[in-house]
Amino acid sequence: MEDQTAKGEDFLNKAEKKINGWALFSSKYEDAADLYEKSANSFKIAKAWDRAAEVYIKLAGCHLKLDSKHEAASAYVDAANAYKKISPKDAISCLEQAVSQFMEIGRFNMAARYCKEIGELCEAQQNVDQAIAYFERAADLFQSEEVATSANQCKLKVAEFAAQQEQYPKAIEIYEEIARQSLNNNLLKYSVKGYLLNAGLCQLCKDDVVAITNALGKYQDLDPTFTGTRECKLLTDLAAAMDEEDIGKFTDAVKEFDSMTRLDAWKTTMLLRAKEALKAKEDGPDPDLT
């Protein structure tokens, strides 16, 4: 490893000399780019991630001088991959540079891919607002390139986060939209009941029994097969429990569903919110406040 680090430093020094020396404009940047790449690769082998990332950024700068924007974008991606090991914030910054270059040369699919990656990094850092922004941007770019599957994956992440932030109408709109799209696809139509369940759980969290009942009718019209599913039964039972303000009935419906189809963390969170709202109603107003 020490040998690779020394090689990295040696290639880096040679590259800097090329940049600062006398030569034809294109020639010196082409030669320096080759040396920077060798330097960065050596640092990467040595797992000197910060040094590798710094040199990849220098390599990107060389490619920009040569007006090679695709190569510059790729170098920024390499820098981001190195920074992921030590500094997610710097990784995001490099990926933003890559997205900018890919956008300039019309490589929207690549730009979308790295917007999605930035969204995932923001999610890991629990920066939900930024994650939403990048997943939305990725979805729009994938949509423009007619990559529907990837676009919907990003939209579903937006819906998940929107619901977590209690932006229920936004989440509902996305889940319903993707459910409609999926009905016409033989490979995706089996996922429709899951999307409608998620939309229904968001409806429950709005704590509006009339809206929940109307939504259930709409979902059964949208997909007649939904009526016979466990997902539809769960939502119907929960809506009835909320209408009757019966927390026991609510709990029993959730337990019955969970015994057959394990609830994930997101659904559990939505159900707990709805249950808390129901419990508050069942308990009635605080006598000290009346």
Image: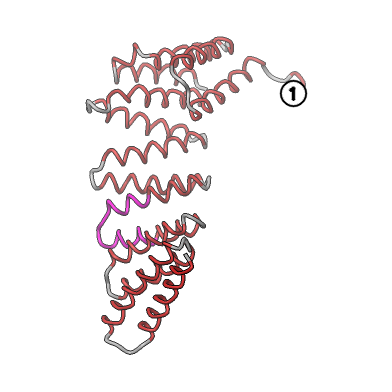
- In the foreground, 19 or 251: 19
| Residue at the farthest bottom position | 22
Reply yes or no: does residue 105 show up in magenta. yes
Between residues 14 and 173, which one lies in front from this camera angle? 14
* Relative image position of residue 96 (x, y in whole percent): 40, 58
- Mark 1 residue type: Leu
- Please identify the dominant SS of the magenta region: helix
Above or below, comparing residue 96 to residue 241 in the picture: below
Colouring rule applied to residues: secondary structure
Q: In the picture, which quadrant includes the C terminus?
A: top right
- Residue holding disc 1: 289
Give residue 88's position: percent from left, percent from top.
49, 54
Residue 193 on image: x %, y %: 35, 21
How many numbered circles are shown? 1
Q: How crowded is mark 1: few (under 14 residues within 10 Å), some or many (20 or more)?
A: few
Q: Does the magenta stretch include residue 264?
A: no
- Give the residue at x 39% y 75%: 11
The relative height of residue 121 versus residue 212 in the rendered view (above or below) is below
Location of residue 176 (image quadrant): top left
Q: Which residue is drawn at 58% across and 18% down?
A: 278
Q: Which residue is drawn at 28% across and 38% down?
A: 149
Give percent across and percent down for residue 177. 32, 31
Q: Looking at the image, which is closer to me, 26 or 105? A: 26
Local secondary structure at mark 1: helix
Horizontally, is 116 left or right of 24 in the view? right
* Nearer-the-camera pick, 95 or 211: 95
User: What's drawn in magenta, residue-wise?
Assistant: 97-115
